[in-house]
Amino acid sequence: MIHILVIATFENSTFIELAISALEQKGIPKEKIFAAPLDKRTEPRQLFDTIHKADGFSLFDAGAILGTCGMLLGAVYGYVLTWGPILWGIIGAVGGILIGFVIKLLMIKKSRLGSKKITSEIVLMIRCEEHQWETVEKILWDNIALGMTRIDK
């Protein structure tokens, strides 16, 4: 008899209770079902990356692009303006960097505040037999599991 371990994650909702009840009705005993809630992060994520931690959001990519465009346009049109191409190139670069930084900062703040992200809050582990796998899988997907894996013993 081959035993498998099924691990699934759920949001904290009534669907996890429905999934556990359905599993028990299909013949999986309570002793083989384990649900554990996850603790949530209490401190907010850092806005600026450090050399040791980076979250994938860069505040400087838009600033670099707009700074390059501003420097190029400042240098080109600086030939016909009074201060010359070097000063207008520097002004365009600094202005582009600042505008890009502010735009990206506002976009990241808006995306963090405005959108509700789906997070896994409860981990459900089920020890079952090989012939019960398809039933368990169907029950978990029907009850809106966020993710699932199967570990063969």
Image (cartoon, helix red, strand yellow):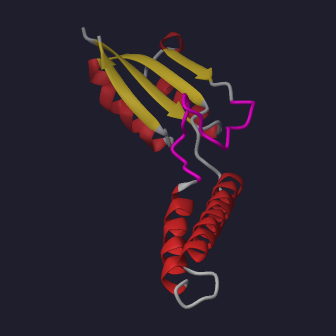
**In the depicted structure, whether residue 31 falls above or below residue 66:** above
Magenta highlight range: 41-59
**In the depicted structure, whether residue 27 falls above or below residue 105:** above
Residue at image x 27%, y 22%? 131
Residue furthest toward the bottom?
80
**Could you say where residue 117 lies in the image, as x and y percent from the top left?**
61, 48
> Number of marks in the image?
0
114 sits to left or right of 74: right
Residue at image x 64%, y 38%? 14
101 sits to left or right of 74: right
**Could you say where residue 134 lies in the image, as x and y percent from the top left?**
31, 31
Residue at image x 55%, y 83%? 78
**The stretch drawn in magenta includes residue 46:** yes
**The stretch drawn in magenta includes residue 18:** no
Residue at image x 45%, y 19%? 126
Q: Main secondary structure of the magenta part?
A: loop
Q: Nearer the viewer, residue 152 or 64?
A: 64
Q: Nearer the viewer, residue 50 or 18?
A: 50
Q: Quadrant of the C terminus?
A: top left
Residue furthest toward the left?
1
User: Quadrant location of residue 139?
Assistant: top left
**Could you say where residue 129 lies in the image, as x and y percent from the top left?**
32, 16
User: Quadrant location of residue 39?
Assistant: top right
142 sits to left or right of 58: left
**Could you say where residue 85 lies in the image, as x and y percent from the top left?**
54, 78
**In the depicted structure, whether residue 16 falls above or below residue 71:** above
Q: Quadrant of the N terminus?
A: top left
Q: Nearer the viewer, residue 63 or 144?
A: 63
